Amino acid sequence: MAHIHTRRALAPVALITTVGLLALTGCGGNSTAQDGSSGSGKGTLKVGVLFPGSLSDGGFMESAYRGYERAAKEHQGKVAFSKVEQVQAADYEQALVRFATTSDLVISLGGQTDAAVRKVAARFPKVKFAEIGGPADGKPTANLSLYDPQQAEAAYLSGAAAALLSKKKTVGFVGGAELPAIVNAAKEFERGARSVEPKVKVLTPQYVGDFNDAAKAKQSALADYSAGADTLGQILNLGQKGVVQAASGRGGTLIGGPIPAKCGTEKAYAAYVETDIGAEIEYSTDQLVKGSWKAEAVHFGLTFDEPHNDLHLCADTDPSVAKKLDEVKADIASGKVTTR
């Protein structure tokens, strides 16, 4: 059964001091740092986090890393954190195994790690695992929790915004990989678009094959712009930089996020999706420290008091557009519209 939780307001982002190294050689990624004031003290809990992408991707991974930093600061002296970033898919399992041999809790980011984390969790039944952003309909196991940042919900909002903002009434969606969660998000993007503009043309989703490949993402976006779209939704990491380049060259726009940037910092963005991925790292760590951690499915999203999903329009638009989006948000919050 899924559980809904609310959290306190989050602390500001803070930098943490690197005090040691946990070698993860051969994992195809950057070496991991052990963060916190006490990495080997008696009774110190250990948390390892796998970031498949870059910590400065301007999206999903960076949002998660901000929560990692907040958790490390809050639990300094109680929890020793270790991380690895930019790991190749073939090396997910190896990285997770190395974390599992030294950690009380192992957290993996992104649905692309789903198969690996399930396999490793089964091998280490005494270690707690959490996956953030896996299949929305996935089932937790005895020692594996699933945290859903409601990407489908954010995609529905993005679709509605794209359709309302599109002058050509043609929109498209670019996803990093054809994973269940991303395919589902593409469907919700289309649902959201048609909910506000029934006759809008929604192009067939483009799947880049790599969340971080900006060059390929640019090609996918250019194909959509050439096919008549003028506003794109996307779920990419570093790859969204390629979509920005395509939009800038073709006079198109896109919906950004999940980090809520200030509108106007990049003219290509018509709107930003606000989704705090890092809150889920904080949630899992909080439960570990309290001794109340359990394997569960937790759905974050628009219904949360803090943090919650949202979408912010960047350009001055007809007031009716903002009003319509507020109605869409209200329908989701009330349960009138459900996304999965």
Image (tube, rainbow, N blue to C red):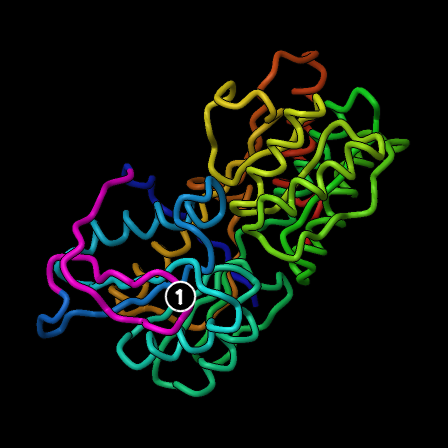
Q: Badge 1: few (under 14), some or many (20 or more) residues near its Cα, within 10 Å?
A: many
Which quadrant of the view contains residue 267? top right
Task: Please name the residue shown 24% across and 60% down the image.
Answer: 33
Residue at label 1? Answer: 107
**Residue 139 at x, y percent in the picture:** 58, 72
Q: Is residue 147 left or right of residue 8?
A: right
The answer to whether 227 is drawn above or below residue 169 in the figure is below
Front one among 111 and 11 = 111
The answer to whether 299 is drawn above or below residue 70 in the figure is below
**Residue 305 at x, y percent in the picture:** 45, 40
Front one among 147 and 265 = 265
Give the residue type at disc 1: Ile
Task: Please name the residue shown 73% across and 49% down the image.
Answer: 186
What residue span does the magenta drawing correspond to? 13-38
Which quadrant of the view contains residue 320? top right
Count of marks placed on residues: 1
Q: Residue furthest left?
A: 41
The answer to whether 152 is drawn above or below residue 128 in the figure is above
Assign a secondary structure to mark 1.
strand
- For the C terminus, the image quarter is bottom right
Main SS, magenta residues: loop
